[in-house]
């Protein structure tokens, strides 16, 4: 009888312990707090296939040497000019004259290039020179230019710096000018020279050949 009562006591003790443990384990545990989680992504290469739209700024880097292709057909060729070909470089020289009569302040001289240049040809003026005779003590301004013969258009307009060289027979002052130039003209233009007297009176004659 005593043995049975001890077994019952032990069984009751295990039962109480089990109930106590179950009550303790079933109690919820509160969190101490939440910490932020940072996720860093590495950009991945993206390949676009097919048709798509790209907006915004797109950065591109060159890989290797540039290769430019021209795919014009024979019906629409790319125009090419061989400017350094000696056969296309034709020497050319011309001249014009401006005569300043007594009593005049300005005189003009013109040269129609349509009669001096082949049709459809363009020329480069690389040098201009002038010789001016003026009454003793008088100075002058000289302008040389090129203009379209029809319509409106100015090829160039150049002012000469005249340098006095001396007096001829005590009657005329001799002035010269020489300057390099790089101006384009063609047969649709005319050359023009304008000689203007710089003096208190318009007496005496002046002349200006431009070879």
Image (cartoon, rainbow, N blue to C red):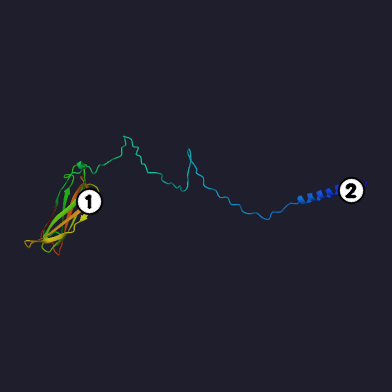
Left or right, 12 with reference to 136: right
Instruction: In this rendered view, identify the residue nearer to me: 127 or 59.
Output: 59
Estimate the x, y position of residue 172 in percent, counting from the top left: 9, 61
The earlier-in-sequence mark between 2 and 1 is 2
Classify residue 131 by image quadrant: bottom left
Instruction: In this rendered view, identify the residue nearer to me: 53 or 65.
Output: 65
Left or right, 193 with reference to 7: left
Say the numbered circle drawn on residue 6. 2
Q: Is residue 26 visible?
A: no
Instruction: In this rendered view, identify the residue nearer to me: 64 or 18.
Output: 18
Classify residue 206 by image quadrant: bottom left
Q: Residues within 10 Å of mark 1 (few under 14, many from 20)?
A: few
Say the numbered circle drawn on residue 114. none
Label 2 or label 1, whichever lies nearer to me, is 2
Furthest residue toward left: 169
Picture mark count: 2
Q: Is residue 176 visible?
A: yes
Furthest residue toward top: 74
Residue at image point 79% right, 50% down: 21
Above or below, comparing residue 83 to residue 205 in the picture:
above
């Amino acid at each position: 009888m005593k043995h049975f009562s001890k077994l019952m006591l032990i069984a009751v003790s295990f039962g109480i312990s089990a109930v106590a443990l179950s009550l303790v384990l079933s109690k919820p545990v509160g969190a101490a707090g939440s910490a932020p989680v940072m996720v860093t992504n590495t950009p991945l290469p993206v390949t676009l296939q097919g048709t798509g739209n790209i907006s915004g700024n797109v950065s591109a880097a060159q890989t290797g040497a540039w290769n430019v292709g021209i795919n014009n057909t024979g019906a629409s060729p790319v125009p090419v000019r061989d400017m350094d070909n000696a056969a296309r470089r034709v020497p050319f020289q011309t001249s014009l004259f401006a005569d300043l009569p007594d009593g005049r302040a300005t005189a003009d001289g013109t040269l129609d290039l349509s009669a001096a240049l082949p049709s459809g040809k363009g020329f480069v003026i690389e040098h201009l020179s002038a010789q001016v005779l003026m009454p003793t003590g008088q100075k002058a301004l000289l302008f040389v230019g090129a203009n379209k013969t029809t319509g409106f258009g100015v090829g160039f307009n150049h002012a000469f710096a005249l340098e006095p060289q001396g007096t001829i027979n005590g009657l005329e002052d001799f002035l010269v000018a020489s300057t390099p130039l790089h101006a384009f003209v063609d047969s649709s233009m005319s050359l023009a020279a304008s000689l203007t007297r710089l003096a208190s009176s318009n007496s005496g004659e002046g002349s200006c050949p431009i070879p």
